[in-house]
Amino acid sequence: MDTALDIGLKLVAITVAFVVVLLIVAYTVLAERRVLGFIQGRLGPNRVGYGGVLQPFADLLKFILKEDIVPDKSTRFIYFLAPVIATMAALMTMIVYPFGPEIRIPFTGITIPLTITRLDIGLLYVLGVTSVGVYGIMLAGWSSNNKYSLMGGLRSSAQMISYELALGLSLIGVIMLAGTLDLGQIVEMQSGWHGTRWFIIFQPLGFIVYLTAAIAETNRVPFDLPEAETELVAGFHTEYSAMKFALFFLAEYINMFTVSMLATTLFLGGWNVPFAEDIFGRGTFLFGLVSAIGFLLKVVFFLFLYIWLRGTLPRFRFDQLMSFGWRILLPLALLSIFITATLIFLFPNL
Amino acid sequence: MLALLFLLFAALAVGCALAMVAQRNPLYSAISLIGVFVSLACLYIMLAAPFIAAVQVIVYEGAIMPGVVFVIMLLNVEVEERRTGRLKFLVPAAVVLAFVLFAEVAFILASMQEFYVTPASASANVGVTHSIGTALFTQYLLPFEITSILLLMAIVGAMTLARRGGLLSPNARVIPGAQQLPLSIVDASVGIEDTRAVETDTTDEAARLLGYERLRDESERE
């Protein structure tokens, strides 16, 4: 009976997390359009609801009502499977992130952890599930039976495999400092110094490498070659329309969100807000609330950074992209590991 | 519950493995193989070895299989046709070998009955990150280092094979940014049947191969 209750509670937690994340993702899309509008000296969508707040729902309605076109010569099963894989892989990492500390509901004495599950291998789980996402794009490109789609799919798989290396290596410094792969424990270790002992202080190089590789992993500007409009029409999703296109769109923004959450968790102290523990005291309801809001604000900062980059930078050329990944980013990540290991060896008590 | 999950994933693994062999389309075979790896990872988790499961997914599904799928997509391999009449003498051999395999499995199962070990009686933290790390870097350090040197040799070998391309003739024109072009496109004096390739990654590299200081003169463009 207890296991059934446990499974039920987990399902509720997963549903809540998914709804919250999807809402944030929907508003990231709106924020992107408004901020890009601001950067480019125009207004952006502001007609649906006050200042455009209902725009995401209007978009969704449009996606649902559009005609769903399937190319005649496509490989139908894989064509349908690809967007599902992309979205599923993006959503599945959600369950290991610590959104906040344990939160105590006032007057009841019930404590709920603000994380769906704690895994001993949390970080590896994230890396593993993210690596599945590449199949969505590759298979979409192949099954569409369209040369632009195929080129986009090939480019994207080459890019994601190349940058996954630098991404994984940039995290090793943090793992060495923390001595664990459990994301919850990594966040706990950053709560020293009144909540400011963030790993970015010890891992500035690793942070920069991670951020760059993460932008490439999510196929965003300036690394958005898989869907370079000027060369490939729309890349791997050229032949996708209606809700299937929306799933790819969703997967891209969820990936942005999860990658930002990982950056926050590993480098910016997760839910640690400076001096929150001194003011509210550990374990109180307000402490939990402030910490969770702090976590979300840090994630939103990264999301803003993504949009800012998109409004600022031009796109790489493909050969530049590859040589940047292999000749600059990968050696930098190795250098970061080397420096971290040396410092840990020399000052084991820091 | 656990037995049910085991049956599910075991059936998935076997089904995907059969599909991999039976499929005629190489891409479908590759996808079935991915299914096998995922099911195996799930089985590892059920055996309380989460680290091995994660590594299984990252290495096989995240690194090796994208390479395989990549090659299948690039080469645009056609659906394999059913070969008839060839290697027919292997069929009875296959039957005999299958019988031997099943006999082996039955023998192992029969001998296992006497000292049946439940997974719970094994050391509880065998598959956990910490114990694997400790074992790898203390007890099994030498095999670990030898394996890494082997992998390094494989990488260097692959690089050497991939880099073995023909040199450019001095009057060949090179299109920068292109990874590989047949020589006949850039050099009119070479026939179409010549399959040698021209390789260059950047404008600077192309210029260096051609013996010029710069390939594109900025003043020349105007």
Image (tube, rainbow, N blue to C red):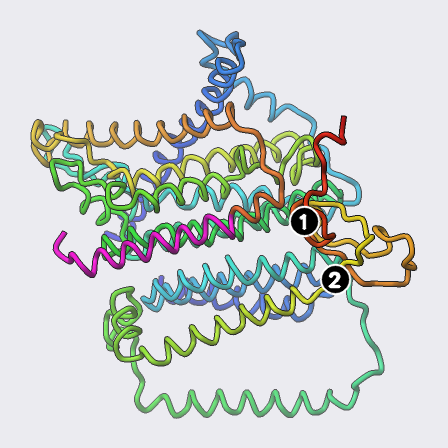
Q: Chain of mark 1?
A: A
The numbered mark at residue B140 is: none
Name the residue rendered at 24%, 31% in the picture.
A292
Residue where numbered disc 1 is placed:
A77
Q: A39 or A51: nearer the eye?
A: A39
Residue A181 position in % (x across, y down): 29, 55
* Residue B75 as seen in the image, left or right of residue B44: right
Name the residue rendered at 64%, 44% in the picture.
A80
Residue B83's quadrant in the figure?
bottom right
Name the residue rendered at 23%, 71% in the picture.
B124
Instruction: Please rate how many residues cluster around mark 2, counting C-alpha atoms within 10 Å: few if below 14, some from 14 to 19, many from 20.
Output: few
Q: Chain of mark 2?
A: B
Residue B165's quadrant in the figure?
bottom right
Residue A306 position in % (x across, y down): 45, 30
Q: B100 or B4: nearer the eye?
A: B100
Instruction: Please rate how many residues cluster around mark 1, counting C-alpha atoms within 10 Å: few if below 14, some from 14 to 19, many from 20.
Output: few
Which amino acid type is shown beneath numbered disc 2?
Leu
Instruction: Examine the rendered structure and indicate whether residue B18 appears above or below residue A135.
Output: below
Q: A303 or B149: nearer the eye?
A: B149
> Which secondary structure is most common in the magenta stretch?
helix
Asked if the magenta segment contains residue A339, the reply would be yes
Asked if the magenta segment contains residue B61, the reply would be no
Residue where numbered disc 2 is placed:
B167
Instruction: Examine the rendered structure and indicate whether residue A181 appears above or below residue A144.
Output: below
Which amino acid type is shown beneath numbered disc 1?
Phe
Which range of residues does the magenta coloring cover? A325-350
Residue A208 position in % (x across, y down): 38, 41
